[in-house]
Image: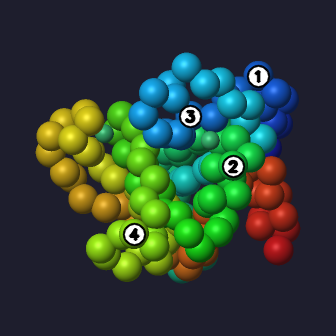
């Protein structure tokens, strides 16, 4: 992400609301966003160089940001239609390990499941990326 894009997003953060699913009958809730979840989708030129084709940037509230960093919840996020769903790992039949599973297509938008998406970088950084911390990652 370009530094300018990052600064523009951060400047607008105060006006953003959480775009994640908070359960049935909660769409009227306008929860202030505290950060952006960022997922670059691209392909690798080499081990060190990745070309970003597009970036999904999702405003998240403080509760969702916390859940994304904990061990209790896994977020399913469809980047075709931006719908999302939380899975409680304790009650899930499958053992979920990731904080976010990015879906290409879901029943909400297509009725066709296009598969899970993992970028090569994401496989190495096994944790959600938050915009406010992107600079730290780049500097590390
Ligand atoms: Zn939220
Ligand atoms: Zn979808």
The residue wearing badge 2 is: 63
In the image, residue 5 sits, relative to residue 46, either above or below, namely: above
Marks 3 and 1 sit apart, C-alpha to C-alpha, by 12 Å
Marks 2 and 3 sit apart, C-alpha to C-alpha, by 12 Å
- For the residues carrying marks 4 and 1, which lies nearer the camera in this image? 4
Q: What is the number of the mark on residue 91? A: 4
The residue wearing badge 3 is: 19
In the image, residue 79 sits, relative to residue 15, either above or below, namely: below
Marks 4 and 2 sit apart, C-alpha to C-alpha, by 19 Å
Q: Is label 2's Cβ within 8 Å of ligand 1?
A: yes
Mark 3 crowdedness (10 Å alpha carbons): few <14, some 14-19, many ≥20: many
Viewer-side residue, 2 vs 91: 91
Residue found 80% across the figure and 50% down from its top: 132
Q: How is the model colour-coded?
A: rainbow
The residue wearing badge 1 is: 15
Residue found 59% across the figure and 73% down from its top: 71
- What kind of element bears circle 3? loop
Residue found 64% across the figure and 69% down from its top: 70
Which percent across, then down, holds residue 103?
Answer: 34, 53
The quadrant the C terminus occupies is: bottom right
Answer with the quadrant where ligand 1 appears in the image. Answer: top right
First in sequence, mark 4 or 3: give its number.
3
């Amino acid at each position: 992400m370009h530094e300018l894009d990052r600064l523009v997003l951060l400047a607008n953060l105060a006006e953003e609301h959480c775009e994640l699913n908070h359960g049935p009958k909660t769409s009227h809730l306008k929860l202030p966003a505290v950060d952006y979840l960022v997922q670059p989708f691209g392909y690798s030129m080499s081990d060190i160089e990745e070309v970003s084709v597009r970036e999904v940037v999702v405003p998240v509230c403080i509760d969702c940001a916390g859940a994304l960093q904990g061990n209790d919840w896994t977020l399913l996020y469809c980047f075709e239609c931006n719908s999302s769903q939380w899975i409680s790992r304790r009650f899930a039949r499958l053992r979920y390990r990731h904080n976010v599973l990015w879906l290409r297509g879901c029943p909400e938008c297509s009725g066709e499941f296009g598969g899970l998406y993992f970028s090569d970088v994401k496989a190495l950084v096994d944790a959600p990326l938050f915009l406010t911390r992107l600079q730290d990652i780049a500097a590390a």
